[in-house]
Amino acid sequence: MIGKLRVRERWMSLSIRYKIGIFVGTTVVMVIVICLFSVLTMYINMRDFNEILGDSYQVNHSLVCFEAENAAFIACSQSMNDESLVHYQQTKQQTKEAISQLKLDYQKTGLQRYLIAQAVQTSYSYYSSECNRLLSFTIKDVIYANQYYDTLDVAGYISRYLQELMKVTG
């Protein structure tokens, strides 16, 4: 009780100018703290947003590269000339690089995204080896037609996996 009286007496003895200075100073400090907190919150959110945006870009880039490779494979398998083979090899290299950069960190991406990305990489590896094998056949080979359509089915699975990965990434 005695402490409260002393504080009150001290407060009452201060001039109006000094009291206004304390009020303004306290207000300025509170505004600065709120601004710093807002900037920190914005920085954290922007960092997370940039990571999600980068991941989405990588998945989309992989999908675009894969679709270009698949189209180049179809063109190459139909024409079997050097120009189409070179174009196919270039698109294949771009796709391989893009798919290898997909995040496969279970701790950061979660189970669903990890499993889909793993399915993309595994399926792509199989698809790539089948394409190479098919390009070594001649179109007249009996086994060619069945394996050609099986390979295109795998390409469809990879496209769907990448589209699903896009959904769970964003």
Image (tube, helix red, strand yellow):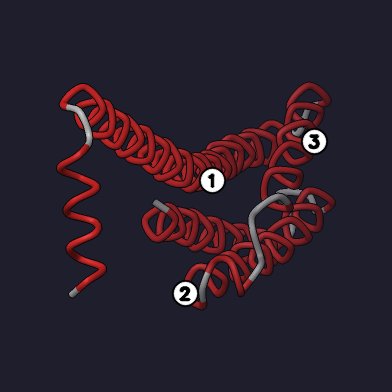
Question: Neighbour class for label 1 at 10 Å: few (<14), some, many (≥20)?
Answer: few
* 7 with respect to 164 (left or right): left
Q: Which one is nearer the viewer's eye here, 60 or 8?
A: 8
Q: Horizontal and vertical percent for residue 129? A: 78, 60
Question: Would you say 87 lies left or right of 46 here?
Answer: right
Q: Quadrant of the N terminus?
A: bottom left
Q: Give the residue pinned by disc 1.
A: 51
Left or right of 87 on screen, residue 57 = left
Q: CA distance from mark 1 to mark 3?
A: 31 Å
Residue located at (15% from left, 26% from top) = 16
Callout in the foreground (2, 3): 2
Real-space CA distance between mark 2 and mark 3, rounded to the nearest whole angstrom? 31 Å
- Mark 3: give few (<14), some (14-19) or many (20+) Cα within 10 Å: some
* x then y, percent, for residue 87: 74, 27
For badge 2, the amino acid type reads Gln
Give residue 104's quadrant in the image.
bottom right
Give the Cα separation between the discs numbered 1 and 2. Answer: 18 Å
Q: Residue at image x 66%, y 68%? A: 105
Q: Residues within 10 Å of mark 2 (few under 14, many from 20)?
A: some
Residue 32's place in the image compared with 145, above or below, is above
Quickly name the residue at label 3: 89
Amino acid type for the residue under numbered disc 1:
Glu
Q: Quickly name the residue at label 2.
A: 112
Give residue 43's position: percent from left, percent from top. 47, 39
